[in-house]
Image (cartoon, helix red, strand yellow):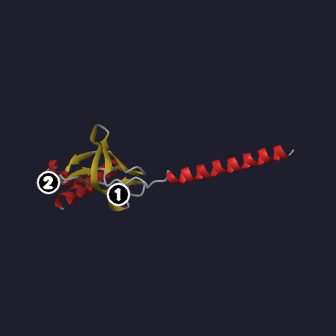
């Protein structure tokens, strides 16, 4: 019986020693977290065109329904509806590009990715201020005229978008 007890005690000591080695080995494997990225991956997409596809950028400024927002790397995940306004993309070392978008959604993902799905968009530099003034005047004429309610509602939406474009061009 004593041989059995000695063998059992030896097994317990060996198991305890193995457990201590495992715990020590685990502690030795600890390391620091990876450094946080300082860039944002941007995808800016229209139904008919991809403007940016996983492009590394420094910052993106958007016209959200809740107000203007600047989005940087490590931004809290969120989904924001966009109002007619400017999306400004600040690229690493090459300045910024501005796009006017009519509406859409911006989604900030937890992995430093920003996806903007816009209904319509154009580079701000390609928009003619004269054409905007002319089209705004026409839309306001329809709103104030004797058109049907549906035509007036459509013209009001056009006028709102042209006013937002005018405001964006004046900045």
Viewer-closest of 170 and 69: 69
Expressed as whole percent of the image width and height from the top left, the position of residue 38 reads: 32, 55
Residue 23 is left or right of residue 65, and the answer is right
Q: Earlier in the sequence, mark 1 or mark 2?
A: 1
Snapshot quadrant of residue 46: top left
| Residue under the image location 82 percent in, 44 percent down | 3
Q: Tell me how far mark 1 sits from mark 2, CA to CA.
A: 23 Å
Picture disc at residue 134: none
At mark 1, the secondary structure is strand
> In the image shown, does 97 or 94 lie closer to the viewer?
94
Position of 115 relative to 165 (above/below): above
Front one among 2 and 45: 2
The residue at the far right in this view is: 1
User: Which residue is painted at 55% across and 51% down in the image?
Assistant: 26
Q: Is residue 50 visible?
A: yes
Disc 2 marks which residue?
129
Categorize mark 2 by other alpha carbons within 10 Å: few (<14), some (14-19), many (20+). some
**Which corner quadrant holds the C terminus?**
bottom left
Compared across the picture, whether 71 is left or right of 122 comes to right
Under circle 2, the secondary element is: helix
Residue 75 drawn at (x, y percent): 38, 57
* Residue 129 image-quadrant placement: bottom left
Residue 145 can be seen in this image: no
Q: Position of residue 7 (x, y in %)?
A: 77, 44
Q: Nearer the viewer, mark 1 or mark 2?
A: 1
Residue at the top extreme of this rendering: 48
- Label 1: how many Cα within 10 Å (few below 14, some 14–19, many 20+): many
Whether residue 121 is situated above or below residue 95 in the rendered picture: above
Which residue is the site of mark 1? 64
Instruction: Please provide percent x and percent y for residue 61.
Output: 29, 57
Q: How many marks?
A: 2
């Amino acid at each position: 019986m004593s041989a059995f007890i000695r063998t059992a005690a030896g097994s317990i000591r060996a198991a305890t020693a193995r457990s201590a080695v495992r715990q020590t080995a685990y502690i030795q494997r600890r390391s620091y977290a990876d450094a946080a990225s300082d860039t944002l991956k941007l995808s800016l997409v229209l139904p008919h065109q991809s403007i940016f596809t996983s492009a590394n950028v420094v910052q993106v400024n958007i016209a959200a329904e809740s107000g203007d927002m600047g989005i940087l790397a490590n931004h809290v995940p969120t989904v924001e509806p966009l109002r007619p306004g400017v999306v400004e993309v600040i690229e690493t070392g090459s300045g910024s590009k501005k796009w006017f978008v009519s509406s859409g959604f911006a989604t900030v993902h937890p992995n430093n990715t920003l996806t903007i799905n816009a209904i319509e968009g154009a580079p701000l530099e390609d928009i003619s201020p004269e054409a905007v003034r002319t089209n705004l005047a026409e839309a306001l004429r329809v709103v104030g005229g004797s058109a049907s309610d549906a035509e007036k509602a459509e013209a009001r939406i056009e006028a709102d978008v042209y006013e937002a474009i005018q405001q964006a061009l004046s900045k």
